[in-house]
Image: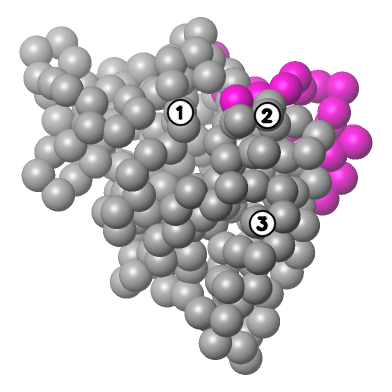
Amino acid sequence: MKCVIDGIYRFGKDFATLSLAPNKKVYDEKTIRKGKDEYRIIDPKKSKLGAALRMGLKETGLFEGAKVLYLGIASGTTASHISDITGEHGLIYGVEFSSRSIRDLLPVSRVRKNMIPILADARMPQTFASRIEKVNVLYQDVAQKDQSEIFIRNAKAFLKKGGTAMIAIKARSIDVTENPKKIYAQEKQKLSQYFEVVQQVTLGHFEKDHAFFLCRMR
Ligand SMILES: C[S@@+](CC[C@H](N)C(=O)[O-])C[C@H]1O[C@@H](n2cnc3c(N)ncnc32)[C@H](O)[C@@H]1O
């Protein structure tokens, strides 16, 4: 099989990652066997990265051996695919402030040794700074009113110059009454002060009123 985008494979309309832990599903995802290899389909209804790929995302900046900071890792659905891509030489620092979600993440991180769960509030990077190193990729999915500010704060603290940063923006978390398109434009302006915004896609019917931005740290 040939990668179509940064460690991601294509099966018809579906995108998939080559499993780092064959026979160990994470969220009831569909799998495809090719000889000894197992590919895990990224469900676009359960993963915003999967939705963004289906909506035309062209790159992710992820690679084998990459160090990733993931804000809002929850129980590890999307992070498990990132874990497949970064492989055993990569690392994912997964920040999550819900202890319930961290509990659900633990069995996943026990199998996938490249995941480090961190119980912390992403708004306060200083509280987890001593536990992580500079990263190649920042990924954020936290559905907070100040989601862009959280993203910028963490990028400044931990993302290497030229590193890739992806954020899923939930318009309704910022303002329930405003037109989502206006919110995306407003958030893009904030991001543009610190990043080159490489691509923006909306998540369509997979995630209503969400946009996904792929940025590069200046
Ligand atoms: C939509 S879910 C993430 C789903 C996950 N990204 C995936 O695709 O597998 C958002 C998560 O962000 C967490 N979250 C929200 N605000 C946060 C914050 N300030 N710090 C850390 N985690 C936060 C929530 O507890 C929730 O688990």
Q: Quadrant of the C terminus?
A: top right
Q: Which residues are magenta?
A: 111-136
In the picture shown, does residue 16 fall above or below 107?
Answer: below
The quarter of the picture where residue 146 lies is bottom right
* Residue 44 seen in render: no
Numbered label attached to residue 62: 1
Q: Are marks 3 and 2 in contact (CB under 8 Å)?
A: no
The residue under the point 58% across, 73% down is: 185
Which of discs 1 and 3 lies nearer the camera? The answer is 3
In this picture, residue 147 sits left or right of residue 13: right
Q: Which residue is mark 2?
A: 161
Residue 27 colored magenta? no
Q: Which residue is mark 3?
A: 191
Callout 1: SS: loop
Callout 3: SS: helix
The quarter of the picture where residue 45 lies is bottom left
Type of the residue with mark 3: Leu
Sequence order check, earlier mark of 3 and 2? 2
- How many marks can you see? 3
Residue 128 colored magenta? yes
32, 137: nearer the viewer: 137
Sequence order check, earlier mark of 2 and 1? 1
The residue under the point 35% across, 49% down is: 57
Give the distance between the C-alpha atoms of the residues marked 3 and 2, in whole angstroms. Answer: 15 Å
**Where does residue 52 sit, x and y in percent of width and height?**
37, 54
